[in-house]
Each structure stands twice: as structure tokens, then as C-alpha cells.
Amino acid sequence: MQEPKFEIRAVHTESTVTVYQAYAPVIGLPAAKEGRFPAAWKRDRMTWIKPSFLWMMYRCGWGAREDQEVVLAVEITRDGFEWALEHACLAHFEAGLHADHDAWRRQLKDSPARVQWDPERDFHLRPLPHRSLQLGLAGEATRRYADNWIVSITDVTALAHTIHGHVKNDDLETAQRLLPVERPYLMDDSLMAHLR
């Protein structure tokens, strides 16, 4: 069965959704230990959260890229995640969704969150035909994320390295068993219409 081109897939429960980020140890290790981001984490910068584990692996090189050595699974409230989506703007102009480039730029400037749909990745980090959600948070959204939405932060670097080891050994069956199970995250179409 073919995947829908634009569909959020994530590890989620009735009340939470898990997203991934990767940081240098100075941020990632205390964040996992304390369950919140340390003072070194800059609230005034846009922070990107990703529901796709494999897209995060593509971005951080399985936790091997400089300043992305610690991979975090951040469990946040569904209410917070959906607030960000409802208040987000596409990171690029899309004819039919935006009246013109100027209207899109104004919306982008005024939005506390932005969305990119990037190609999902397979175990070898090659692009797939369907898209993976990247959600950028700034301003109010960043503050809400750090102060209100986080339920837990878990260091999953060892898991990333273990799965990568199985991929390198061409043992994709074991890699698949270890991969977090991401299911479609269903939302009312009217809440996502401005992001597709």
C-alpha cells in the first residue's frame, strides 16, 4: 500500500507524541538527565522537532555529526504539538495556499511555528517518495515547548548506534525490530489544510 505523500507518522499515545532532536553533549546530556533543557539551550533560536526517527538519523548522521552527538526522544503533549501545527506556516510559498509571496512572507513572520515536508528516509538514509514533517518552533512556541509541553526527555543515542550497526551489517530485519514504531498521527483535515 502506498504511503500518502503528506502524512504525520510518529510514536504517540492518547496524550503524547514523541519527537526527536540531536544536540552537542553540553545540551543533550543534561537535558536527558533533568528532563528539561539546560541554560545553554538558546530560547531565542528556532528549534526544529522531528517525529521521524529515520529522518533524524539522516539529519544527525546516526549521532555522529559534530554538535549532534546526543540524540534525544522528546515526549511532548499532543495539545502542544497540535497547537504548534495550528499556528504554523509552511516554510515555503505554495501557490493556492497563499495569495501571493508577500502574503506568505507576512504569515511566516507572524507565525510562531513553521512546517517543512522533507523526503522521508529509509535505513540507508535514501529519500523515499513520501514526506516527513519537520516542525520549527520560535518565540512563543519555543517557550511553550520548553516550559509546558515536555513530558519526558530520553537519550536514545545508544539505540541509534545499535540500529546503525545492524544496518551496516545488512541486518535490516533486526534494525526494523528495534526501530520505534511510528503510526499515522490522525488530525482533522481542516486543521492541516494550511500545511499541505
Image (cartoon, rainbow, N blue to C red):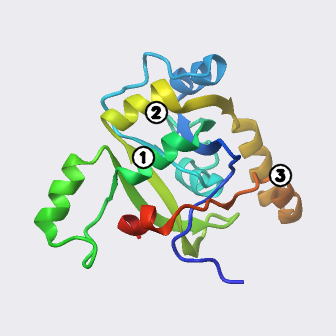
Disc 2, SS: helix
The answer to which quarter of the image holds residue 48 is top left
Question: Disc 3 or 2, which lies upstream in sequence?
Answer: 2
Q: Nearer the viewer, residue 4 or 67?
A: 4
Q: Are marks 3 and 2 in contact (CB under 8 Å)?
A: no
Question: Spatial distance from mark 3 to mark 2, Cα to Cα?
Answer: 28 Å
Comparing labels 3 and 2, the label whose residue is closer to the camera: 2
Q: Nearer the viewer, residue 149 or 173?
A: 149
**Residue at mark 2:** 145
Does residue 23 appear in the picture of this structure? yes
**Residue at mark 1:** 84
Mark 1 neighbour class, 10 Å CA radius: few under 14, some 14 to 19, many 20 or more: many
Q: Nearer the viewer, residue 130 or 67?
A: 130
Task: Give the amino acid type for the residue marked by disc 3 in the picture.
Answer: Leu
Mark 2 neighbour class, 10 Å CA radius: few under 14, some 14 to 19, many 20 or more: some
Q: Which mark is residue 105?
A: none
Q: Dividing the image into 4 quarters, which one contains the C terminus?
A: bottom left
Task: Give the amino acid type for the residue marked by disc 1 in the picture.
Answer: Ala
Q: Is residue 71 above or below residue 125?
A: above
Instruction: Give the image location of residue 99, x and y in percent.
Output: 17, 72
Question: Disc 1 or 3, which lies upstream in sequence?
Answer: 1
Question: Spatial distance from mark 1 to mark 3, Cα to Cα?
Answer: 29 Å
Question: Spatial distance from mark 1 to mark 2, Cα to Cα?
Answer: 9 Å
Mark 3 neighbour class, 10 Å CA radius: few under 14, some 14 to 19, many 20 or more: some
Instruction: Give the image location of residue 100, x and y in percent.
Output: 14, 72
Task: Give the amino acid type for the residue marked by disc 2 in the picture.
Answer: Tyr
Q: Dividing the image into 4 quarters, which one contains the N terminus?
A: bottom right
**Residue at mark 3:** 178
